[in-house]
Image: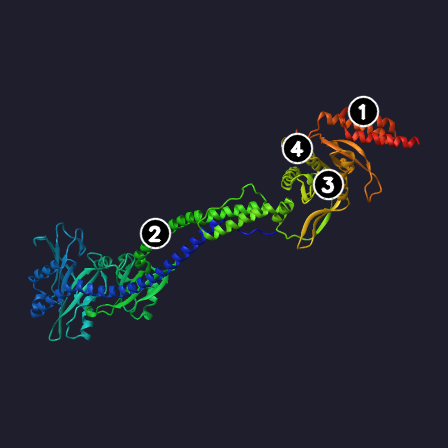
Amino acid sequence: MRKRRLSFSLRAGMSILVFSIIGLSYWGFFAYSYLASSNVYKENALKYISKHNNEIGFKLEVLLNPIGNSLKIIRKQIADSPGYFTSQKFAETLLLHLQNQKDLISIFIASASGDYMQVQNTRPSMIVAGRVAPVGAAYNKWNVVRSDESAADIVSRYSFYGPANQLIDSFDLKNKYDPRQRPFYKNIERSMVADPGGDFVQIDPPYIASSTKQYTFTLTTPVVSKKKLLGMVGQSFEIRTISNFFQSNKISKNSQTFVVDASGKIIIGTDFEKMFYEKDGAVASRSLLDYADPAVNIAASERSRAANKPFEFVSGEKSRKYLAQFSPFPNKLNQQWEILSVAPLEDFLEEMEAANHRLLVFGAGLAIILLIIFYYVVKVLISKPVEGLVFELQQLLEFNNSSGVHRLQTRIEELGILADAINRLKVTLNAFVAYVPRDLVGGLLKSGRPIEIGGESRYMTILFSDLQGFSSLSEVTPTRELLRRVSAYLELMTFSVKEERGTVDKFIGDSVMAFWGAPELNQNHAYHACVAAIRGMRRMVKLNDDLVAAKAPPLVVRIGIHSDAVLVGNIGSMERLSYTVMGDGVNVASRLEGVNKEFSTNICISHAVFMEAGERLCVRPIDLIKVKGRAADIAIYELLGIRDGDAETRPTARDVELGGETANAFASYRAGAYAEAAALYDSISQQFNDPLSRIMAEKCLLLGRRDVS
């Protein structure tokens, strides 16, 4: 079985084509624009990250510079007057510096002899030296004076002051606190080895403050006189301060910024909660490789290869693209740290994505509008005319001319030419079927097969009709008038044949040759041939009435019908073909048409026709005749009507009675009772004024005399 191809209408096909072209063009432009824009945005993002890291370093300096400057001022004051290490009056100076730096938690000084003084902002419920700070305390002061190194315990005095510097509470605590053993002092001593002049400010590693329990940074600077370490000054602030600073200065909404040391340990980060954890009372910094973010882990692994240049990488199950860069930390704080910024590429493309989304929606809407416009343009200018042409062609292929011939209206020149060609083809086919059997042409159109010479044997019914006295009529009738009369008769017979699904083979002068059973098979070919003959004969009555009214002689038609096996098909050459029937059966049908003249009948049918459709026919027997080429006689009948026909073809009461009377007479004739038969035929002749009966009566009398003699 042949597989049917996918098909669709012209309108849909052209719409799909145009939509595809528009869609592909738009998507091509959109893809190119997207890629070009993405590359530009990515390059700008890489530059922006590099700029961001530099700005972060600069802003950190700006953030920490006031603290550093404050440390330098205090350092200078103490270097000029070393007695400030133990001067209670100097606490007011420290408090002034503390109040001028809003981000500071505390400020302290420590001497080389072990003296220590700290001024600290006090928060509600703060624990100081194991005690809860008194209500209303704004700051506290912690003093350690090591005037007597031999003392068993060193006294630490804690004093709490209100907003107006009024003393609220104080207490002493004996301990062996020595600032020189603390990390901040040890770091100063180590840095002095590299820089004996002591002209530096450094930031110490983070720690957890005992009073605030917060992760804390301390900026420190040494107090030096003649390259001798007299002590140090420090100011502390919470790490969260810088984390908040990073949060407020993010490069994008999902970016992260870190300050890390040489080993990759996190010093400061955007997300404060993820940076540190407490271990054994100390601060433990997470490394970039341990950080709870795969993108940060991958960025850390690329640190050595990046060489402080921006780089791109992919992370996560969704293969998100990230941009990152390591940049040197400002070395003014005496630490070899680096700044890392990591940001998803999509953060920088968000604005572009939004613009592209708007462009996509706009483009899709425009494409739909264009498609609708094109759809209706195609419908009006192309599709509708083409559909009309297709309909006309289908009507031609189905051989249906009910639509008639009309001019298709179109503004497209080529379609107009095609419409004219179809109209001409329709006119030609209509004319063609006047020469070739209509069913044959229809079959050729439907099958699509070329005409081939050849035929086949079929049992069919053949009809011949002829005009009585045509030769004499043609001698006395003007040519034009004769043509009009004969054409009226031929048209009448042709329509009668076609109405009964017959095929008009040819016109031979005033004769009509038709057949049933080809090209299309017809199981009731004999019956339909008889019906056509009766219709033609009955319609001739009306035609003759018109002729008589016009004072013209009437036309008498004689018809012969025979059923037989004949050869039917395309006969001739490829230059000239004729679809016709051949064989002895054709000759018999032609002979029967001529028999009518001998017996003064109108429609003569053979016994073969009678055998095919006799029970539906009203007939009367005529005689047995000899046909050239056949040994046996052929029984012939006169067709009077169609018993189960319509009003036009049904037999009259006279026909039925005449048929019955003739059958009785013919029975006597066949039995050899010629005298009886002659009497019966004579009675029929007088009763019905029947020429056939007169002829048969004379024949019976002649045969009777021969028998007597």
Residue 463 quadrant: top right
Point out residue 388 in the picture as x, y percentages from the top left corner: 50, 46
Q: Are marks 1 and 4 in contact (CB under 8 Å)?
A: no
Which amino acid type is marked by label 2?
Answer: Phe
How many other residues sit within 10 Å of disc 2, few (<14), some (14-19) or many (≥20)?
few
Query: CA gap, disc 1 to disc 2?
Result: 102 Å
Point out residue 250 in the picture as x, y percentages from the top left corner: 25, 59
How many other residues sit within 10 Å of disc 3, few (<14), some (14-19) or many (≥20)?
many
The residue positioned 66% from the left and 29% from the top of the image is 647
Which amino acid type is marked by label 3?
Answer: Thr
Residue mark closest to the camera, 3 vs 1: 1
Q: Name the residue under label 2.
A: 362
Query: CA gap, disc 2 to disc 3?
Result: 75 Å
Residue mark closest to the camera, 1 vs 4: 4
Query: CA gap, disc 1 to disc 4?
Result: 30 Å
Query: CA gap, disc 3 to disc 1?
Result: 35 Å
Q: Mark 3 falls on what kind of element?
A: strand
First-in-chain label (3 vs 1): 3
Residue 683 is labelled as 1
Query: CA gap, disc 3 to disc 4?
Result: 28 Å
Q: Residue furthest front?
A: 476
Relative horizontal placement of residue 318, taking residue 273 as reference (left or right)? right
Q: Name the residue under label 3.
A: 461
